[in-house]
Image (cartoon, rainbow, N blue to C red):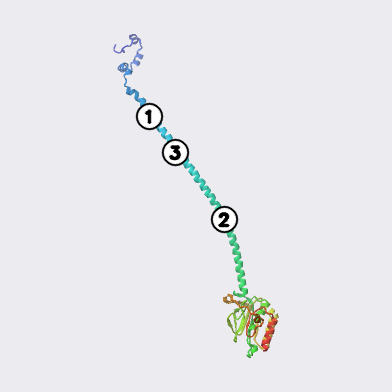
Amino acid sequence: MPDQIPGEDLRAYVTKPLLDRITDQSIDSDYKAAAARRDPSEEEPGRRRRPGVWAMVVVGLFALLATTAAVQTSRNEDVRQTSRQVLVDRIEQRQDRIADLHRQIAALREDNQRSDAALNSLGLRAESASSTAVSTAEKTGFAPVTGAGIRITIDNAADGNEGGTVRDYDLAVIVNGLWEAGATAVSVDGQRVTPRSGVITSGATLRMNDVSLSPPYEVSAIGDPRTLAARFAETVSGAMIHTTTQDYGMPYDVENIDRLTLPAAPPDLLELTYLKPKSEDEGAKRPDRSKGSAKPTDNTDEDTEENSEGDREE
């Protein structure tokens, strides 16, 4: 029978159901025969060992890659740790620097506050000193001043009598009387009276602050116009100058002025001069007021009156 497989029992072949036979014989009989004839020992040795070699190669490569990755990872981790530590150190240094800067800023702020307080104090002191300087300059005559007051005018007698000529001590008496009456500033013919000013006789001319004066002489004083003239008249100086002008026919007038402006004295008066000390003999002599200077000093009105009457009688 052609369909019978060699070596198969005939009985089994004949008695085997047809459906099972067809299923079993679905693969070509020749392939089965060839497979049955092939000896497993006849396979090529290379083919049998090749899958193991490749597996070893692959495993080795994988192990090499894993080792390289581990080493690289370890190195990278060291680098990362080093970089992290460097960054941490830098951050700490910057934080310390910032803390130092904050302390410096706080110290500078305190210094600024102290400097501002000192500046404000100096400003107040400067304002006070400036105000004091202005007030002192006005009082001493080295700054212009404006205010109400009185003006006294005195002139030589019209008849030309020598006794009716205005002399330096006449003006000095008027100035002293005005100070006594409460004047705060005085000028003679526009020349401010200062502690270093004085009316002197230079020939037939009166001079003050090294400036020539000419009649009629005007003596201006700043003060309370309601009381200054009356208080001046009540002083010994005021009574004496009133009597003198009446006796010798000298024009004399006192008037209240609502607004007077007295100029400042020449600045060269501020220059200090050094005077040679007088000897005992020179100091004992009394100056001749009819020919010398007549500075507004603190001499008593009695001495002024006595010398004035003696000079005029001569």
Earlier residue among tags 3 and 1: 1
Q: Position of residue 266 (x, y in %)?
A: 57, 77
Marker disc for residue 109: 2
Against 242, residue 95 (above or below) is: above
**Which of 124/266 is in front?**
266
**Which of 123/78 is in front?**
78
The quadrant in which the N terminus is found is top left
Earlier residue among tags 2 and 1: 1
Question: Can residue 226 be seen in the rendering of this structure?
Answer: no
Label 2 amino acid?
A: Arg
Give the residue pinned by disc 3.
76
**Which of 91/238 is in front?**
91
Of helix, strand and loop, which one carries label 1?
A: helix
Image quadrant of residue 117? bottom right
Marker disc for residue 14: none
Image quadrant of residue 201? bottom right
Residue for point 44% across, 38% down:
76
The nearer-to-camera label among 3 and 1 is 3
Give the residue pinned by disc 1.
58
Earlier residue among tags 3 and 2: 3
Residue for point 60% across, 66% down:
127
Q: Residues within 10 Å of mark 2 (few under 14, many from 20)?
A: few
Horizontal arrangement in the rendering, residue 299 relative to residue 105 (left or right): right
Against 91, residue 54 (above or below) is: above
Label 1 amino acid?
A: Val
Label 3 amino acid?
A: Asn
Q: Label 3 vs label 2: CA separation? A: 48 Å
Q: Residues within 10 Å of mark 3 (few under 14, many from 20)?
A: few
Q: Residues within 10 Å of mark 1 (few under 14, many from 20)?
A: few
